[in-house]
Image (cartoon, coloured by chain):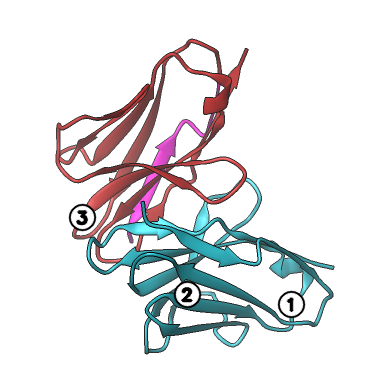
Chain colours: A red, B cyan
Amino acid sequence: EDKVVQSPLSLVVHEGDTVTLNCSYEVTNFRSLLWYKQEKKAPTFLFMLTSSGIEKKSGRLSSILDKKELFSILNITATQTGDSAVYLCASSGNTPLVFGKGTRLSVIA
Amino acid sequence: GAVVSQHPSWVICKSGTSVKIECRSLDFQATTMFWYRQFPKKSLMLMATSNEGSKATYEQGVEKDKFLINHASLTLSTLTVTSAHPEDSSFYICSARDWASTQQYFGPGTRLTVL
């Protein structure tokens, strides 16, 4: 059975801190790993990763995939209160996206 | 980027009524659309996969007679929650897979509250 596991489940940091969110996956015929940010509505797309070792960056956010270890991390540097959200990791393979339970990030001033 | 819309955004209904939620891909064609359900502070749970012109494929434990899905065109899928009950109250999110890029895009979600 395909599964995606995220850690930690919840995280509270101060503004300016750097955080690393983890995602491990077991997916048959892996195609891609995706990161989403969810605030009050539906998830918004952050990154799609298909190749190992290639970092994707968008501003203060970056992500990398390790296909050998079946693992991905999402880094956020110089966190801001606006980064507070649930970050979801999802993987696609033979089935539609399989989501992890998410990491709830709270950034306090 | 690609846009997926959902209508309505929020609906409150009485127990026993049926509610229809629409999901549209606005600037791309989606041969496949997915319906997810999300409980408070939980992750998304896939309910069904909807393929244009054919019957939807439901995940285990999802009642197909309760959650009717129709995918009549390449840009529209509908989810009808029949005889809704309070336990159906949830956040329903659709996503559409762009047939050209295979990228999946999410709608903004519909919050259903059944009294």
Q: Earlier in the sequence, mark 2 or mark 1?
A: 2
Badge 1 is on which residue?
A: B84
Examine the rendered structure and indicate whether residue B27 appears above or below residue A105. Answer: below
SS majority, magenta: strand
Q: Position of residue A81 (x, y in %)?
A: 58, 21
Viewed as shown, does residue B92 lie left or right of B85?
Answer: left
| Residue annotated with mark 3 | A31
Q: Chain under label 2?
A: B
**Callout 1: 10 Å neighbours few (<14), some, many (20+)?**
many
Instruction: Tell me what residue is drawn at x 50 percent, y 59 percent.
Output: B107
Where disc 1 sits, the SS reads: loop
| Magenta residues, start to end | A1-12
Q: Across the whole image, how many numbered discs are drawn on residues?
A: 3
Chain ID for label 1? B
Q: CA distance from mark 2 to mark 3?
A: 23 Å
Q: Which mark is residue B60?
A: 2
Tell me what residue is drawn at x 22 percent, y 66 percent. Answer: B100
- At 41% from the left and 83% from the top, the residue drawn is B73
State the CA–CA distance, disc 2 to disc 1.
20 Å
Query: Residue at coordinates 62% horizontally, 12% vertically from top-left?
Result: A109
Marks 2, 3: nearer the viewer = 3
